[in-house]
Amino acid sequence: MQIAQSKPISFSWRSLPWEQFAPWLVPASLIVIWQLLAQLGFISTRVLPAPTQIVEAAIRLTLSGELLRNVGVSLYRALVGFSIGGSIGFSLGVLNGVSRPAERLLDSSLQMIRNIPHLALIPLVILWFGIGDPARIFLVSLGVFFPIYINTFAGIRSIDPNLLEMGKVYGLRQRELFWQIVLPGALPSMLVGLRYALGLMWLTLIVAETIAANSGIGYMAMNAREFMQTDVVVMSILLYALLGKLADSIVRALEAWLLPWHPSQSH
Amino acid sequence: MNTISSDQEVLNYSTDHGAHVSIQGLSKSFGDFPVLSQIELEINPGEFVAVVGKSGCGKSTLLRLLSGLDKPTEGAIYIDQQPLQGLNPFARVMFQDSRLLPWRKVLDNVTLGLKYQNKQRGQWALQEVGLSDRAHRWITQLSGGQRQRVALARALVSQPRLLLLDEPLGALDALTRLEMQNLIENLWKEQQFTAFLVTHEVEEAVYLADRVIVIEEGIISLNLPISLPRPRNSGSLEFAELKVRILDQILGRQRQPERHSQEFTAIES
């Protein structure tokens, strides 16, 4: 970046920051091709509207306040579901990771529940909670719970017992062993779980909002389908992609912050 | 009689002499399998004792019993005439694998388990092992030899009265090992702790120890004082003779005393 700016006259292709551009090259080219095909009439706007039309739809819905409201509602559901499922998953993961009796008591039951696809519960969940927010939050919590639980548990169990033995010889008490050795040692695995959980969080929410909702991004898309507003449908889908990417970037930032020592962070 | 237990806050800090260790009738078996039987051993304050033996002879088990990580099946260990129960608060262990925490920087590894004056004491210990300039590096940025030096600093930072060395140099290359041997010898002379070294390197044992102990099938089969002046010359004849004598004991070889010097050349070649 700095090199390109400091030498504006002798511009050369090599001075461009390719490292940063590279990930965007493929999506950007696809959009350009898509725009051209749509404008030249190769793709019907019914099937797939041009990118410019989608941008127009986004501007229209932003101005009416509809977009922001629906995104806000979806984000709220995602975060509440994530907090509930994540904190229960984390607590049980730590409990079963640290205590063998707790593992014997709980783990096989949890594994049985894990093997039920949580989206298969939608009919039951609607019967229980109706089609209101609690139903969607319940499903998101369930979807988030397992990746967090499993990776927290596995992270704690994969701690090198030699390190724990060393900690004991060096006078650490149980509580100090947990905070200074167990938790930091399990953190890389926990963050892998977090990344999976965030992916499942969006997936669950999309499905739940598409099937039964009266607000949210999924509802916006389903509603637009009834009025044949393909541009809004595509925009909603792109919005999910962007929000998913955002969640992933947050986890990457967390990894860089929490695991500066980890080999995955060395550049 | 007072017992030593790990929940006492022990101020190793003020004591500058090594611990006296007395091992009496010590046996340890895992299930039906006896590892150590009826070990009797006195270690004087500030003495450097090395234990050698084939792998599986029980030498590492003895070290674990001294650290309090394992409990004896029979017999007892007395530290300064007080029976050891639970973890040994006077002892620090240096392991073969450095067992450093990769999520802590060098200095924070050294100060693990310290309760006060962490920074200064950590810096002091790093200075002792010659690594003050690496205080803020990650463990992954260090070489194997440097990691063992950090582990040594971590063991010494609380100024233990008994240092237990469990094959600490086994994973290092020959040159680094020589450097570390000198470092350990110098720090031992300076701080006068009691040192208990478990090793399979007879030469290392003879180079460092006041007394070499050979353990065979769970019993002490040789207890040999080494009175060579320090720093020792591993090329000298006396050194080589002691080494051969210990090796013979370990390998179960019989030989005539007068033929020692002739056969020793054959072993060396």
Image (spheres, rainbow, N blue to C red):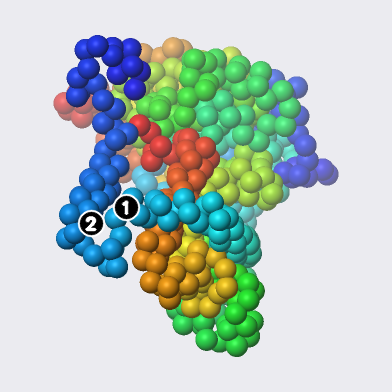
**Mark 2 surroundings within 10 Å by alpha-carbon count, few (fewer than 14), some (14 through 19), many (20 or more):** some
Subunit under mark 1 = A
Residue A238 x, y percent position in the rendering: 39, 57
Res. B190 image quadrant: top right
Of residues A47 and A111, the one drawn nearer to the viewer in this rendering: A47
Q: Secondary structure at mark 1?
A: helix
Res. B162 image quadrant: top right
Quick check: B25 left or right of B146?
A: right
Name the residue: 61% across, 22% down. B122
Label of residue A158 in the image: none
Quick check: A149 left or right of A266?
A: right
Residue A233 x, y percent position in the rendering: 40, 65
Above or below, A13 against A104 in this view is above
Name the residue: 66% across, 40% down. A171
Label of residue A38 in the image: 2
Q: Which residue is mark 1?
A: A51
In primary-sequence order, the first of circles 1 and 2 is 2
Quick check: B27 left or right of B159?
A: left
| Disc 1 + disc 2, Cβ < 8 Å | yes
Q: CA distance from mark 1 to mark 2?
A: 9 Å
Subunit under mark 2 = A
Name the residue: 29% across, 27% down. A17
| Residue A88 in view of the camera | yes
Of residues A254 and B73, the one drawn nearer to the viewer in this rendering: A254
| Residue B214 in view of the camera | no
Image mark count:
2
Residue A202 x, y percent position in the rendering: 47, 63
Q: Amino acid at mark 2?
A: Ala
Residue A134 x, y percent position in the rendering: 64, 74
Q: Amino acid at mark 1?
A: Pro
